[in-house]
């Protein structure tokens, strides 16, 4: 097997996980009584569930307000 094929196969096994912090924080607060989690363990559990022999490249945690129209609709204004 050539180096290019091995390299391509290795790249296909790399996984990046993106965590929507706003959603997850709200879910943990409302459904799990404010449970705190270890994000490294959480990421590795997700990885094990979706692809057991993959390599976790990185976990990205982001937390930002949802998109709002310009100008915001009445519903968007009431939420935020």
Image: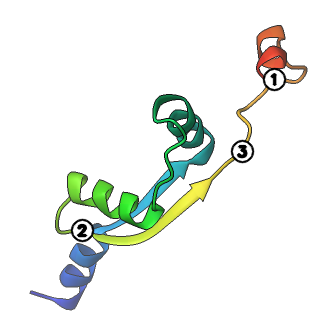
Which tag is nearer the camera, tag 1 or tag 3? Answer: 3
* Image-based side of 19 in relation to 9, left or right: right
SS assignment at label 2: loop
- Label 3 and label 2: CA atoms lie apart by 29 Å
* Image-based side of 55 in relation to 59, left or right: left
Q: Residue furthest right?
A: 71
Which tag is nearer the camera, tag 1 or tag 2? Answer: 2
SS assignment at label 3: loop
Residue on which disc 3 sits = 64
Q: Are marks 3 and 2 in contact (CB under 8 Å)?
A: no
Q: Residue 21, labelled with which disc? A: none
Above or below, 23 against 70 in this view is: below
Q: Are marks 1 and 3 in contact (CB under 8 Å)?
A: no
Above or below, 43 against 6 in this view is: above
Question: Which of the marked residues, 1 or 2, is nearer the chain's N terminus?
Answer: 2
Between 15 and 27, which is closer to the camera in this rendering? 27
* Residue drawn at the location 85% of the way across and 19% of the way down: 72
* Residue drawn at the location 32% of the way across and 64% of the way down: 44
Q: Residues within 10 Å of mark 2 (few under 14, many from 20)?
A: some
Residue on which disc 2 sits = 54
Q: Residues within 10 Å of mark 3 (few under 14, many from 20)?
A: few
Quarter where residue 10 is shown: bottom left
Question: Which of the marked residues, 1 or 3, is nearer the chain's N terminus?
Answer: 3
Which quarter of the rendering shows the N terminus?
A: bottom left
* Residue drawn at the location 74% of the way across and 38% of the way down: 65
Residue on which disc 1 sits = 69
Question: Which of the marked residues, 3 or 2, is nearer the chain's N terminus?
Answer: 2
Q: Indicate the position of residue 20 as horizontal and vertical percent values.
A: 56, 45
Which quarter of the rendering shows the C terminus?
A: top right
Q: Indicate the position of residue 35 as horizontal and vertical percent values.
A: 49, 45
């Amino acid at each position: 097997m050539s180096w290019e094929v091995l390299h391509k196969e290795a790249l296909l096994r790399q996984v990046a996980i993106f965590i929507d912090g706003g959603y997850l924080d709200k879910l943990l607060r409302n459904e799990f009584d404010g449970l705190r989690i270890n994000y490294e363990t959480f990421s590795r559990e997700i990885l094990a569930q979706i692809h057991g022999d993959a390599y976790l490249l990185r976990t990205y945690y982001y937390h930002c307000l949802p998109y709002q129209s310009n100008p915001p609709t009445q519903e968007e204004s009431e939420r935020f």
